[in-house]
Amino acid sequence: MLTLEEAQERILAVITSAAAGLPGIEKVPLADALGRVVAADVLAPLDLPLFDNSAMDGYAVRAADVTGASPEKSAALRCVGRVAAGEMFAGEVGAGECVRLFTGSPLPRGADAVVMQEDTQTDPAQSATVRVLDVARPWENVRLRGEDVKRGALLLAAGERLTAGRIGLLAALGFAGITAVRRPVVGLLATGSELRESCAPLGPGEIYESNRALLAPLVRAAGAEARVYPLVPDTAEATRTALDRALAECDAVITSGGVSVGEFDFVKSAFEQLGGTLDLWKVAIKPGKPFVFGRLNGKCLFGLPGNPISGLVTFLLLVRPALLKMQGTRATSLAAHPGVLAEPLVNRGDRRHFMRVKVDEEGRVHLAGMQASHALGALAAANALVEVPLRTTLPAGSAVRVLRWEI
Ligand code: AMP
Ligand code: MG
């Protein structure tokens, strides 16, 4: 049986090569770009700010003219103009002069500081005179051209994901959209003759199918498009037909169920009959041991065990990194956050156990209910995984790495 790291390496190694089709690129308007991955480095076409401008409502001055100014000994300046945001001052500020400015007004030539309005006094009887009550250091209250972003600077490296802040920056630099990696299309198949669609009447021994609903949002959160396929009964032929169609229509296919050793487990054999190569089967983790990975014509098959928690854990540890790598994302693992156990975590088994936990706002880690691989009630209370090594008890108070998948 492979270790988790061996399995991860094998999968990711395939995805760098031409053996697994990378999804290509497309133009995306900024309004739709949240979460998208940029396909190429993005450089700043402009400086930000684009020109020296005022950070305050006030007056553009020459700092040398207000040296030593104070409420007792104000400096009198002649106001020679007014510049609203969006306007330019045609002239130049000379010695003893000032110009009325507002936040965002371009700094007139000749001025090297802005005195804020609160540090000045005006007299309606002498409307051209402004009394400055405080000193100004050179460039005080001036937002300098290029101080935030320099033209030509690297804004985003290929493989980085767009956040709201990054979208705002691109908009400020005049971008209407970006060249993004196309979202990989991921087919979701659920195998099992006992499975029924939600709302359908249940016969004896039948259950509602839940893995496609559980996995689709995780696929989307990993930047891919989830395409949900009809249920697949446990026959060799139905499994082959369903796999064949999904592999033709998608960049990658995730199946659930049918990868164990029972006589109703057809995923592996159906995939091989279609000409697929199985790169691995069985990973030494709990839950999720019978996970399968294979390739056919540059498409990947991820065969997840049917138990919902096993499917979730193998998706997070083995499929999500692959989906991210297909998009050129550099960091592919779940982010590990520090946490402290509020109660002991016990693994008596001989496989590494990825236990479902609830992390609170202080980083205290609580066990999220029963740890069986079918226990969706407990899963719904969890927001993270903690790995507990084989035959190990981690006592309360232990520092652990928490792998979060839900906020
Ligand atoms: P399997 O991996 O096919 O042997 O399934 C293992 C267990 O998970 C069985 O109890 C199945 O009924 C259950 N199961 C399999 N697929 C699903 C699914 N898509 N939704 C809910 N439960 C499932
Ligand atoms: Mg089954």
Image: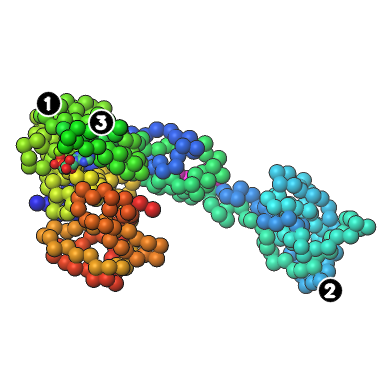
Q: CA distance from mark 2 to mark 1?
A: 95 Å
Q: Is residue 312 above or below residue 117?
A: above
Check disc 2 and report its element: helix, strand or loop.
Answer: loop
Q: Is residue 36 magenta?
A: no
Marked residue nearer the N-terminal end (3 or 1) = 3
Q: Earlier in the sequence, mark 2 or mark 1?
A: 2
Residue that label 1 marks = 237
Q: Residue at x 30, y 63 (%)?
A: 366
Q: Which residues are magenta?
A: 42-46
Q: Earlier in the sequence, mark 2 or mark 3?
A: 2
Residue shown at 49% from the left, 44% from the top: 167
Quickly name the residue at label 2.
Answer: 72
Disc 3 residue type (three-letter) = Pro
* Residue bearing mark 3: 201
Residue 117 place in picture, x, y as percent? 77, 60
Residue 215: % across, % down: 29, 41
Q: Residue at x 17, y 63 (%)?
A: 347
Quarter of the image for residue 262 reads top left
Structural crowding at the residue carrying mark 1, measured as other residues with C-alpha within 10 Å and reported as few (<14), some (14–19) or many (≥20): few
Between the C-alphas of marks 2 and 3, the distance is: 87 Å
Nearer to the camera, 65 or 333: 333
Magenta stretch containing residue 44, yes or no? yes
Type of residue at label 1?
Answer: Glu
In this rendering, is residue 23 above or below 380? Answer: above
x, y (%) of residue 334?
30, 53
Q: Nearer the viewer, residue 391 or 198?
A: 198
Q: Residue at x 76, y 68 (%)?
A: 134
Label 3 SS: loop
